[in-house]
Image (tube, helix red, strand yellow):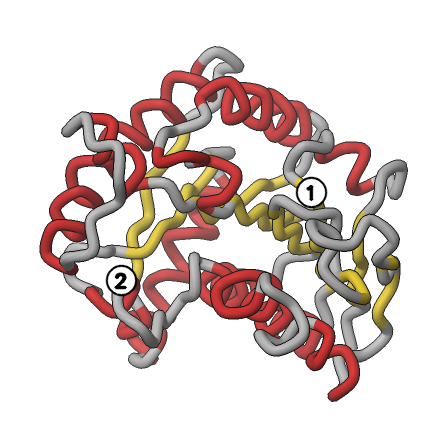
């Protein structure tokens, strides 16, 4: 079973630092799935935060060039963490850096699909991130992949995964902002993403707007449109519990 797991920056790099203990626990969970016969594909943010650690920066810079430099430095550190943590379970990983341009050319799409499936066949876990060195839109106002949510959707649909799991820092899609309103109701299952659902995650009605729940909803719309179930859940929960519906989550049904 192919399963795409998207790890956002809010989870892996809180306060501008890599949350190593959280990552260690999540790798253990993913390794467990791998050993059960799953074929995990990870889409991971966190390169800039890792670069900030290397340069001992406490605040995220605003200059695009500096963010690109940090991403290049940090990507090495991020992959080192993944490599060492997965190696503890005898699992190899591979780095796959992509930009939106790679999904615009048929030849490149074919190559991405061929390489990714080859990694899965040899039981290597591909770890995907945006190639920030050549794709500066990630850091500018109209972010192409919006914290890798859209990148995750493109990869999921290209590889025809069986399930996509988008991990974030809230339990799923709420009627209201759960960080501000403790009584906000979680939407546990969404049959189709209509205008009403979209309004729930809009910037006007939900502070998680741009790059937050709004982009996750857009990603879910793309993935479910390809007939693939998509789960948005809190990364503090064990992935096995998320899959088994033992914890709060929002399931978007594939069309």
Which residue is rendered at x = 86% and y = 39% of the image?
Answer: 244
Instruction: Name the residue rendered at 64%, 38% in the picture.
Output: 235
**In front: 167, or 89?**
167
Comes first in the chain, label 1 or label 2: 2
Say whether residue 112 is left or right of residue 175. left
Question: Is 159 in front, or is 146?
Answer: 146
Q: Position of residue 220 (x, y in %)?
A: 65, 68
User: Which residue is pictured at 67% across the width and 38% down the height?
Assistant: 38
**Vertical placement of 10 versus 133: above or below?**
above
Q: Residue 153 vs residue 76: left or right?
A: right
Cβ–Cβ below 8 Å for labels 1 and 2? no
Please say whether residue 157 is visible from this viewpoint. Answer: no
> Can you name the residue that lies furthest to the bottom here?
195
Q: Residue furthest top?
A: 88
**Could you say where residue 15 lies in the image, as x and y percent from the top left?**
41, 34
* Figure quadrant of residue 34: top right
- The residue positioned 51% from the left and 34% from the top of the image is 123
Q: Spatial distance from mark 1 to mark 2, Cα to Cα?
A: 25 Å
* Mark 2 secondary-structure assignment: helix
Mark 1, Cα crowd under 10 Å, few <14 / some 14-19 / many 20+, is many
Picture coordinates of residue 62 (x, y %)?
Answer: 20, 56
User: In the image, is residue 88 above or below residue 244?
Assistant: above
Which quadrant of the structure image shows residue 215?
bottom right
Disc on res. 234: 1
Q: Nearer the viewer, residue 201 or 21?
A: 201
| Residue 50 x/y as whole percent | 28, 33
Quadrant in the picture for the C terminus: bottom right
Residue most extreme to the front: 180
Q: Secondary structure at mark 1?
A: strand
Q: Which residue is mark 2?
A: 139
Q: Relative to 20, is 255 on the left or the right?
A: right
């Amino acid at each position: 079973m192919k399963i795409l797991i998207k790890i956002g920056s809010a989870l892996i790099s809180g306060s501008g630092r890599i949350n190593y203990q959280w990552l260690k626990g999540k790798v253990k969970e993913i390794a467990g799935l791998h050993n059960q016969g799953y074929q995990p594909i990870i889409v991971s943010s966190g390169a800039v935060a890792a670069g900030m650690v290397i340069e001992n920066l406490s605040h995220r810079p605003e200059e695009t060039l500096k963010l690109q430099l940090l991403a290049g430095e940090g990507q090495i550190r991020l992959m080192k963490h993944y490599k060492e943590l997965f190696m503890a379970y005898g699992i190899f990983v591979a780095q796959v850096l992509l930009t939106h341009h790679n999904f615009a050319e048929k030849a490149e799409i074919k190559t991405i699909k061929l390489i990714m499936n080859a990694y899965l066949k040899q039981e290597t876990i591909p770890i995907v991130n945006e190639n920030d060195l050549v794709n500066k839109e990630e850091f500018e106002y109209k972010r192409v992949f919006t914290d890798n949510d859209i990148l995750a959707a493109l990869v999921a649909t290209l590889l025809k995964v069986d399930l996509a799991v988008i991990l974030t820092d809230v339990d799923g899609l709420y009627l209201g902002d759960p960080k501000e309103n403790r009584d906000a109701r979680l939407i546990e299952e969404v049959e189709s993403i209509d205008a009403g659902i979209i309004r729930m995650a809009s910037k006007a009605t939900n502070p998680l707007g741009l790059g937050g729940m709004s982009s996750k909803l857009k990603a879910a719309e793309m993935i479910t449109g390809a007939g693939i179930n998509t789960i948005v859940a809190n990364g503090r929960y064990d992935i096995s519990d998320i899959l088994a519906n033992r914890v709060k989550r929002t399931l978007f049904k594939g069309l």
